[in-house]
Image (cartoon, rainbow, N blue to C red):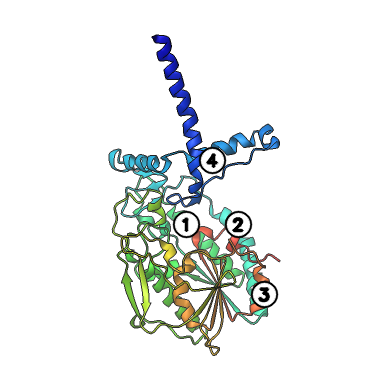
Amino acid sequence: MDKWMNRAFLALLLAVLIAVPAGTALWSHRETTAYYENRTLAELPELTWESLLDGGYGTDLESWYSDHAPGRTTLLKLDTAVQLHLLRRPVVNDVVVNAPALLPKLDFDEYSEEAYQYSAAPIAEDFGAFSAFVEECGGTFYYAGFPEQRVYFEDLFPDYLNSHAREAETADRVFAQALSDAGVTFWDMRSVYEALGRPAAYYSTVDHHYNYYGAYAAYRAIQDFLAADGWDLPVLTEGDIDFVELPNPYIGSRNRKLYNLWPNTDRAVIGVQKDPVAYTRWDNGAPSDKPLFVLPAEDYMPTTYNLYMGGDFAETVLETDRPELPDVLIFGDSFTNALETLLYASFDETHILDLRYYTDKSLKDYISDYQPDIVLCVQNDTFYYTTTGNGNVWED
């Protein structure tokens, strides 16, 4: 009897060992992305003699299986719930949860002011050369720098964690000074928000971006800067816009890492123009019917920061058919998205590039071809010292 029991157990174990990977292989093709992790899942590797001999196939297969194991998302969500609500850990999935806003966990190492000065100098030199190039093409270049949410809410970090507040202040100051020394006009939105009292209502508690109130305050500041520099542009005042809070649950980038389990009352806000400025839109060179705000079909469906302009695109062009107004080129990270829904109304043509994705031509060639009157860089301060993507402005 024991012999048959052992055989039955081994047969069952073998069946499980075969069934799990077989089932994964049969059904996993339906999932290509991890929504809450905001990334693409590993693809099933192709078996070749080369990959088999060098060990690459085994490594890639392990990554694929890890991404596609049955019940993976459910188990990760359950683990997050246990850490949040049962163990009550202050940091879960590298997100600080023991604060009024979700913040990223930061290490305790910091760079010195000298290190930032060393890094800022060549970056500022490239932006200075770029600014001169824009002027040669008949335009004017401006750089608008924004505090990221962790910097905006640096006072909310628990005392036992490092907020990097002093380092962030140093890095921002050094970068702004380097740009100024290189002849670049730099607009420090951190100072703008500080002058307004740094309202908590301007930034999301669950996302690394500002919210629409913060975007609108920045828009008005940019308009004031442009007016002071001699530009006469139409401006969307508060009387021209209805600020509408959406009923949909809002999944911010930080709460997304927690499977949206951190309780909050954040809601996305949009600005509905009372007398809308009409436009024609192109995305990545093709005609697009996307609205300024891409909303879920039903109120119960969640939304994210990608509702603004529909998220990041390599290139977007908005034409308003008002040739008496100047043209603008905006390039930068996702902080541009909410601003785009406002800034386009002040220009004839608005070209928007995200150099993390746009590869058709260099930024210099793009400017040579379209000759914009204004070129505006929009970056959050965690990207100031990045020389790739939107920091790579001097590539031929």
Q: Amino acid at mark 2?
A: Ser
- What residue would you read off at disc 1? 168
Mark 4 vs mark 3, CA separation in Å: 47 Å
Asked whether, in this view, residue 295 is left or right of residue 117, the answer is left
Q: Nearer the viewer, mark 3 or mark 1?
A: 3
Q: Nearer the viewer, mark 2 or mark 3?
A: 3
Is residue 65 depicted above or below 264 in this figure? above
The label nearer to you, 4 versus 2, is 4
Q: x, y (%) of residue 255?
A: 37, 52
As measured in the structure, the alpha-carbon distance from the residue carrying label 2 to the one carrying label 3 is 22 Å
Name the residue carrying label 2. 119
Q: Amino acid at mark 4?
A: Trp
Residue 262 in the image: state x and y as whole percent. Answer: 32, 50
- Above or below 45: residue 372: below
Mark 4 vs mark 3: which is more N-terminal?
A: 4
Label 3: how many Cα within 10 Å (few below 14, some 14–19, many 20+): some
> Could you tell me which quadrant the N terminus lies in?
top left
Q: Is residue 327 left or right of residue 31?
A: right
**Which amino acid does the dot numbered 3 rest on?**
Phe
Q: Earlier in the sequence, mark 2 or mark 3?
A: 2
